[in-house]
Amino acid sequence: MTEQQKLRELLENSSHIVFFGGAGVSTESNIPDFRSEDGLYGSKQAKTYPYPPETMLSHSFFKRYTEQFFEYYFDRMVYPQAKPNAAHYALAELEAQGKLSAVVTQNIDGLHQQAGSKRVYELHGSTLRNYCTRCGRFYDVDFIANSTGVPRCTECGGIVKPDVVLYEEGLDEEVLSGAVDAIRHADTLIIGGTS
């Protein structure tokens, strides 16, 4: 029996599949991963900025060097033209068939939802959501993408922060709890695109 046949049989005999994925799921959508040569931590990327990604994507860097944070963030983390790939669509189809219970993703690109997945736990948040740190008003990715410099709230002038988990920040407890519960009730866990 081939690996594909084994996978097909496993999927056919499962009714509560959970997919846990990372950056490798979105590389076919032209979003770089983290560890490859061209990835966020790869040697080609590391030479472009004076600090490592872990520093530039940290809460303290965001607070202290907000303009440089956004320069890096816009350049390396936001891909508004990215489209779902075959993996995203296959997972959405499994969910539509009643086989897939949830997607747990480390990605912040929103491509699972764009492909049609409904129950997605975004462990690290999403670049598609942004909020004012002062009044809490939400903004979409277009507002951020069309901003120059530090994005400011149109209501109160506060800084509009991406709704992503930065280094030094904790995961959202509700999202984490939902993801753990989904995995706990899975009869099959598929892990892909993560190291």
Image (cartoon, rainbow, N blue to C red):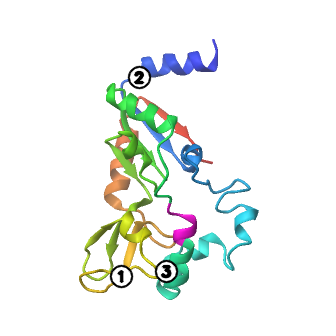
Residue 185 drawn at (x, y percent): 35, 35
Within 10 Å of disc 2 (Cα), the crowding (few <14, some 14-19, many 20+) is some
First in sequence, mark 2 or 3: give its number: 2
Above or below: residue 53 compared with residue 87 = below
Residue 190 drawn at (x, y percent): 50, 34
Residue displayed at 46% across by 49% down: 105
Residue 156 drawn at (x, y percent): 25, 85
**Helix, strand or loop under label 1:** loop
First in sequence, mark 1 or 2: give its number: 2
How far apart marks 1 and 3 lie (CA) works out to: 14 Å
**Residue under numbered circle 1:** 152
Q: Are marks 1 and 2 in contact (CB under 8 Å)?
A: no
**Residue under numbered circle 2:** 14
Above or below: residue 159 compared with residue 31 = below
Start-end of magenta stretch: 73-78
First in sequence, mark 1 or 3: give its number: 3
**Residue under numbered circle 3:** 62
What amino acid is at disc 2?
A: Ser
Asked whether 66 or 150 is in front, the reply is: 150
Above or below: residue 74 compared with residue 79 = below
What amino acid is at disc 1?
A: Arg
Magenta region, mostly helix, strand or loop?
helix
Asked whether 193 or 168 is in front, the reply is: 193
Within 10 Å of disc 1 (Cα), the crowding (few <14, some 14-19, many 20+) is some
Residue displayed at 33% across by 49% down: 178
**Quadrant where the image shows the N terminus:** top right
User: In front: mark 2 or mark 3?
Assistant: 3
**Helix, strand or loop under label 2:** loop
Q: Quadrant of residue 181?
A: top left
